[in-house]
Structures are given as C-alpha cells and as structure tokens.
Amino acid sequence: MAELPGQIKRMSGGIKQLLEQIFGFSRRCLFRIISMGPIPNHLAFIMDGNRRYAKKCGLEEGSGHKAGFSALMLMLQYCYELGIQYVTIYAFSIDNFRRQPEEVQSLMDLMLEKIKSLLEKESIVHQYGIRVYFIGNLALLNDQVRAAAEKVMNATAKNSRVVLLICIAYNSTDEILQAVKKSCINKYTYNIEASGSYKHEDTDSEIEAKDIENQEKKIQLVDIEENMQMSVAPNPDILIRSSGETRLSNFLLWQTGNSQLCFPAALWPEIGLRHLVWAILNFQRSHSYLEKRKKQL
Amino acid sequence: MLSLFSVVFTFLALFLLIPGLFISRRLRVPFSLENIIRFFKITASKYDDERNDERGPMGEKKKRAKNRMPKHVAVILDGNRRWAEKRGLGTSDGHEAGAKRLMENAKDCFAMGTNTISLFAFSTENWERPEDEVKCLMALFEKHFKSEMPYFQRDKIRISVIGNRSKISRSLLGLIEEVEEATKSYEGKQLIIAIDYSGRFDILQACKNLAMKVKDGLIQVEDIDEKAMENELMTKCSEFPNPDLLIRTSGEQRISNFFLWQSAYTELYFPNVLWPDFGEAEYLEALTWYQQRQRRFGKRV
C-alpha cells in the first residue's frame, strides 16, 4: 500500500517527460515552418514585470527575479533553436541603482550567482556555443560581479555560433556619451601628438593637406558607431518588452530606430512561446516592405 | 478505416499538440494539489482586481493620474498614402488630407493644455520616395506655412523647424526662417515641425558639436554629460525637449528614426487608425491611455 504513492509519482514523472518530448518535437516542427519566412537576426528583450509577478503570486520579494531567470533561459532556448543569432537582454539599468539598497543588493547577488553558473559545464552557454558579452558601464558594478563578468567574456571568447549580449549597468544615453568621449580622446590625443611634426608652410599642397587634416579631425558617424559598445552586434530587428509597458526606458535608443517594437501584456516570468511566435509573425509581415526601403537607400 | 484514423489524428493534433505547445509553460510548476488551488486563487483574484478597479472609489493615485497631462506630445504622421489608396485617391490627396487633419489636431491639442507638439513631417529617409511625391510634399509645406501664419500669430504659437536644412529649396527655407522669426517671442505653446529630420543625424550633429568644443578647449572631455548633450540636440529650442507621449498612427510599431535620444522614457502609443482619420476622439483616447500609465523611470514608484 505504501508503494502506491511512489508508483503514482514515477508514472506522473514519466508522463510529464513523454509530454515534454512530444511538445519539444512539435515545437521544432513549428520553428521549421516559421523559418520558411524571414527570421530576425537580432532580438532584444526588456525583462519587465518580475516584481509585479512576485506580488501577484504572493511570493517573497526576491523570487520574482528568480522566476524571471528561468523564463529567460526558456526564451533563450527557443531563440537559439529558431536560429536567431544575436539576443540582447536588459538585465540591469543604471537607473535601477536608485532602487532600495536591499533590492539592489539582492539583484547583484542573484546576478553574481547566475553569471558564475554560466561557466558550468551543463549551462546553456556550452549547450549552444554562446559567446557572451557584458555591455554597460561595468565600472559601476561591485568588484565581484565585474570580475565574474570578465571571466565569462574571456571564457566564451572563442565561441562563435550564437551571441548573447547582457546589458548590465547600462543606459543608452550613457553608451552614446561614452562613445563620444572615446572618439574625442582617440581623435584629439592622436592629432595633438601628430601635429607637432607638421611644418607650417603656405604652399598649395600644404593647404590641401590641412583641409584633409581638418576633415579627419571632425568626428564622423563611423567614429561614434565603432566606439559604441553594442557595435559587436547588428541593430536589433525586434524589441520585445514584457508586462505591457510601452516605453524604451533608455534601452538601445540609437540601435532601435527601425526595429519592430512588441509589447505583450504578459509579465516577464509568464512570457512564453506564443509571444515569441507572435512577434516574429508580425516582423515577417512588415519585413518585405522594409527590405524594399533598405534597398532604395 | 484509414479516413477515420486520419480524422482522429487531425483532431488530436489540432486540439492537443498545438495548444500543448503554448501551455507547456504551466508544466514547469509541479503538478500538485497546492499548486492547483493556488492557480485558481490567482485567476480569481485577477478577476476581482479588475472588478475593483472599475467600481472602486477614486484613490489618491487615481486622482493624481487624472490630472496629469503630457507637456510634450510627439506625433508620427503615418498612413496618408494608405488612406488615399483605400478611397481610390492619389497620394497627393492623401497628404493634403493629412495636412488638414494636422492643423485641426494641433489646435485641439493646444486647447487641451499641451505645451509642445512635435510632428514628424518629413524624414531623411523620405527623400527616397518618388520625385513627384517629394515635390508635392514640399509644395504642401510651403502652402501651409503661408496660409497658417496669421493663425500662429493670433494664437501666439511658436514655430520651430528642426532638421537638416541643406537639401530644402530656397523658397521653403526663406518661408521657414520668416515664420520662425515672426513667432520666436511667443511662450507657452510651441509647434516643432521635423523636416528632413533623423534621430541619428540629430545625435550625430550634437556629438560633433561637443567634439568641436572639446577640440577648441571650451569644455573638457569629462564635462560631456546628458545635460551637455541636451543643449546640443535640435530640441534645445524647446522648454520640454523630451516627449511624454509619442503617437504613431496606422498601427506600425516602430519609431522609424524619429526622436531617439529624446524618447528614452516616452510612452509609446500605436493606434490602428490612419493619420487623416485621427481626430479629437482618438486623441482623447490617447490622453486617457497616457494618464493610466505608471511612469517609474527605472526605480520603484
């Protein structure tokens, strides 16, 4: 008689596994069908709604973020199965430092734990050959998190199949300002050193050379772009923000000028396959029109 | 026999497999009595919450929300060509209808208390459109600047035109300068018209100006911050450079290179209606929607 609950548990475990296998298979079939149309190359996620989810489910304060992390792993798995090469996630904004110190600390602890877990053998990084980048003002993080992030970046530097960009201590306005500062420093310290060797004679060729020199001294679009931290990836094709808030909150402002924006109402831990599929179908709908426009340019 | 089998299989696929794909998330929670009860409680409480929101007394927060009006509204006027196509008219008629609608809506907006309105009239990418369309649009701008000037002066609306002025015709440029000059002293109401504007170009020219200042020694590299950037962007002509609400008609969910830096915390609203059909009722809907938003700017409210 005592064996009965154990047997039932084993049976339900077996059924669950079988169902998961079937759903995994049908999911891959669905992805094959969707891949008939254009697939986005780069997807960006704003993971909003963790705290609201914890409140809704009556969980304690920090566990919303943990649930959010499992949702993230699931979405990454779907994206890489579908063949999307670049995925960017908005993990922590510079504005979030203004939250309650306990919440910031617990977030930092969670991130440290999860970043370290990326290095483990069974993690998703090794499963899909992911190259990980940490984008943002890393100087604002505490030493442990920064060291762990740099370790992960170095460890995955050789992977090349797919790319995950984690935006931590990131603000788009901050990114642009850093790019300008770097361009200024690069352009003008170089020119200050080089100009010592120019002779000032008034021949025609010298004046022409001065003009070219002046032109080179001006910041160009390419200088700003190559100094942006996000230049390692192309511009996002789709930006998905969960929890129904319809704003960008200072995320990838420069890069999402022409991206499709999706705002599903589900909170981040509740996000699922259907939201991803819906976003991609919408992307495919407007894709042909946008490609035509791009060719014209 | 075979047909029966195929019918059964199709039913199974339709009602089991495909829905199963989308609800497989639920299986992540262990299948126990406690969790089933919790699931019911959550669904019930969601229903209760919605009912209370509708019938409950107006709390402090709701009162505050009702009084909040956006100071700066940005509009992307999309859908003129589709509107004309639907009615079997030419593209120029679509743009004409759009321009008329623009003037009406601007008047309504100012009447409702908005301080600044920005309009994405012509994007840098629009130069790629057919030549007649571009010519028609430029002619439309000239015509409306001329005809609406007395109204702007009567209602004391300051007009600012932002964008790259190098490709605009001399006559239009002269008209723009005249309108800006005539209305520059007005305060309280401002209409910003973006002609040949691109968000990236705006940020780039601001970066170039900052870099020039660094090179000339006017500022240090360390002084480059958000305030310095905002003083160089083209929206520096306005008291409220960052829009609170951005409306893009016709249902496309993109910013298409309009305000990039400025829309960092802007609420984005994408109604399905085409621009020439966007009237006072639709604008009121947008305002009501805006007032229900909870803006946190990254921290807890």
Image: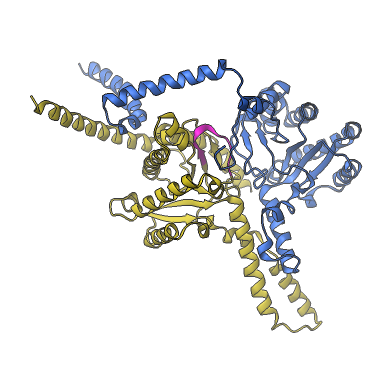
- B183 vs B68, nearest the viewer: B68
Give me the chain that's blue. B
Query: Which hue belongs to chain A?
Result: yellow
Residue A244 counted in the magenta span: yes
- Is residue A129 at least partly visible in the picture? no
- Is residue B39 shown above or below A160? above
Q: Position of residue B276 (x, y in %)?
A: 72, 26
A228 displayed left or right of A203: left
Relative to residue A263, is residue B234 drawn left or right?
right
* Quadrant of res B224: bottom right
Residue A106 among magenta residues = no
Q: Which residue is drawn at the image coordinates 44% and 50% (left, top)?
A: A108
User: Is residue A183 shown above or below B285?
Assistant: below
Q: Which residue is drawn at 23% across and 31% down?
A: A16
Instruction: From the viewer's side, name the closer residue of A131 and A258.
Output: A131
Highlighted range, magenta: A239-249
Q: Can residue A266 be seen in this view?
A: yes
Quadrant of the image containing the C terminus of chain B: top right
Residue A260 x/y as whole percent: 55, 39
- Residue at the farthest left position: A1
Q: In which quarter of the image is residue B292?
A: top right
Measuring from the top left, give residue A132's x and y in whole percent: 42, 55
Question: Which is nearer the eye, B260 or B297?
Answer: B297
